[in-house]
Image (tube, rainbow, N blue to C red):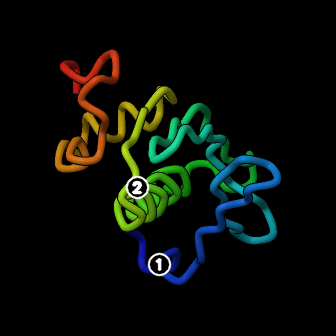
Amino acid sequence: MREDFKTIPLVKNETKKRFEIEVDGHFAFINYGEFGNQIALVHTEVPEASSGRGVAAVLVEKTLNYLEAQGNSLLPFCPYVFAYIKKHPEWKRIVNPKFKGYDKL
């Protein structure tokens, strides 16, 4: 994770149903759905002003760390999150084995 992003706090915005970080006054976020202890990550969005700086990867990493600490089971519907886990297979440990596509991670 980039040093300059380590101190940025992850916020679970329950009103908007998204995990978010604020970078230079702009919000990057992942929309989620919650089903008991399962969390479905459905869409990642980074504002144009923050693109190309690794913000999405930092956001996903912070979110996965949060989910693991909470004991949540992940359903990575978001293509970016899915690709991130495929690139970092150690995170497969928190993906629900019943997730369609689990065998492709």
- Residue 86: quadrant of the picture: top left
Where's residue 2, x and y in %? 42, 71
Q: CA distance from mark 2 to mark 1?
A: 14 Å
Q: Which residue is mark 2?
A: 64
Q: Earlier in the sequence, mark 2 or mark 1?
A: 1
Tag 1 residue: 6
Q: Residue at x 49, y 56 (%)?
A: 54
On screen, residue 75 above or below 102: below
Classify 10 Å Cα crowding around label 2: few (below 14), some (14-19), many (20 and above): some
Contact? badges 2 and 1 (CB < 8 Å):
no
Q: Quadrant of the N terminus?
A: bottom left
Residue type at the position of mark 2: Leu
Percent x, y for residue 100? 34, 16
Residue shown at 74% from the left, 46% from the top: 48
Say few, some or many: other residues with alpha carbon within 10 Å of mark 1 (under 14 / 14 to 19 / 20 or more): few
94 relative to 80, above or below:
below
x, y percent for residue 43 = 61, 33
| Quadrant in which residue 12 is drawn | bottom right
On the rendered structure, is 96 left or right of 45? left
The residue lying at 53 percent from left, 50 percent from top is 56
- x then y, percent, for residue 51: 63, 49
In this view, the residue in front, 8 or 36, is: 36
- Front-most of 29 and 33? 33
Helix, strand or loop for disc 2: helix
